[in-house]
Image (tube, grey):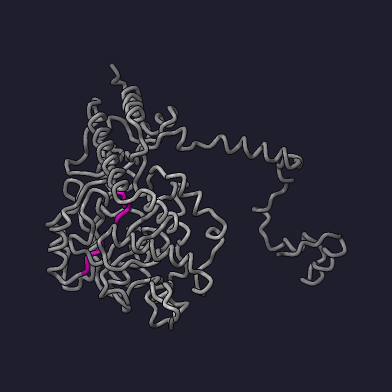
Amino acid sequence: MSYVPNTVAEQEAMLREVGATSIEDLLAPIPAEVRLKRPLDLPPALGEPDVRRLLMALAEQNADLDHYPSFLGAGSYDHVIPSVVPQLFKRSEFYTSYTPYQPELSQGMLQAIYEFQTMVCELTEMEVANASLYDGSTSVVEATLMAVGPSGRGEVVVSRALDPQYRATLKVYAWARGFTLREVGLEDGATSLTALQEAITPDTKAVIVQHPNFFGSLEDMRAIEKVTHASKALLIVAITEPASLGVIAPPGAYNADIVAAEGQSLGSPMGYGGPALGLFATRSELVRRAPGRLVGKTVDNRGQTGYVLTLQTREQHIRRERATSNICTNQSLLALAATIYLASLGKQGFQAMARQCLQKAHHAQQRIAEIPGFSPLFSRPFFDEFAMATPLPAEQINAALRDRSIIGGYELARDYPEFGDALLFCVTEHRTRDEIETLATALEEITGSAE
């Protein structure tokens, strides 16, 4: 705790200690043009009840998803979270727990992480999953570093349909570590197979493709896998919407080497974009190159089941030159939320949730396409996100939707100016038929096409 001098004598003594005679002497190095030359414009001090009232009034000015239906996805998704999830993972024994370094004291947390790893493997049909990473973007980065190896050299081919924030994060690491990124263009909202074949060279260490991709479109992953493995490169599959695994083939089914995913939609709220949860899974022969920690199940000297940190390939645990990454923590609390979420839904519930997302999104696309001026940007199959060309500037439409207490889609021109005015809408199981109709009616009114 920092010490704050309370008396004038104490303040003067501290000033003398640093060679100053006054506060003004202490502040002398700060340029005069950036110093505030008036008292702070603050209201008078309030009592605790008045402060509480003030803060509650300010909080009520925020838009929340209970009153503002959201059709925004693009990497963060509004799914129904069963009440059991926050009720359990916010218990103090989980909420305040730290990294389970001492297994004899952390069996509960270790078991929860082990169950999480098991569920990630079941979702992805991969053989090994780690104990989580920071978020989807750093998970993709760790997968890339794993593919290029300790030298950090080589080429990595990246689809332009990978989340723009993920690509931006990759560029920073490419600059720092020395590997080269080659970006592959699009064809009808998906990775161009022709461009992919042309981009791969003998120096290619990995190919990164998002599925479903940033536009919600489904990629031809079996064709991409053949092209990738024909060149001996590793196939890294990025997933920002794991709910899609309830209805589409998992990465293990088409021989992916590494899966790097965002787990926010598995039991965590959108929360202004965070916190997030990085999922990471791979094939068993690559496990010693995987980042972070792995929890294993064993028996003690009495034959009782026990859980331990089996593999810890980060710098805090082994020599720097042998470490696979510098991931110095994980997201165990959110991993626990994902575990409770998946357990509460069960296999059939998870599939039913995914089917609702699929069906509602397609209904919404068909309804919006009926409005003059709106048309699907791509013709490819999609899961719960779809891009629509708009008759007015996307920013103008979103502003008008906010005036009607609706959160609209993602403005694609921010990252894909070649598509012009277009919005990327997301419809999950949380959206009702009435909310979809409310969105469509609002779009009709905004564009002046209501009958």
Location of residue 54 with respect to 205 vertically, above or below: above
Q: Residue at x 72, y 48 (%)?
A: 37
> In this rendering, does residue 171 appear at all?
no
**In x, y percent, where is residue 200?**
16, 66
Q: Residue at x 25, y 35 (%)?
A: 389
Q: Residue at x 18, y 44 (%)?
A: 381
Hey, which residue is sitting farthest top in the picture?
Answer: 451
Location of residue 380 with respect to 375 vertically, above or below: below
**In x, y percent, where is residue 294?**
38, 71
Q: Residue at x 41, y 57 (%)?
A: 277
**In x, y percent, where is residue 193?**
13, 56
Q: Give the prevailing secondary structure in the magenta stretch.
A: strand
Hey, which residue is sitting farthest right in the picture?
Answer: 9
> In this rendering, does residue 178 appear at all?
yes
**In x, y percent, where is residue 334?**
45, 56
Q: Nearer the viewer, residue 436 or 23?
A: 436
Dividing the picture into quarters, in which one does residue 146 lie?
Answer: bottom left
Q: Quadrant of the C terminus?
A: top left
Q: Nearer the viewer, residue 12 or 118?
A: 118
> Does the segment drawn in magenta span residue 45?
no
Dividing the picture into quarters, in which one does residue 156 lie?
Answer: bottom left
Magenta stretch in the rendered image = 234-243
Q: Quadrant of the N terminus?
A: bottom right
Hey, which residue is sitting farthest front in the picture?
Answer: 302
Relative side of 39 to 93, left or right: right
Q: Nearer the viewer, residue 150 or 105?
A: 105
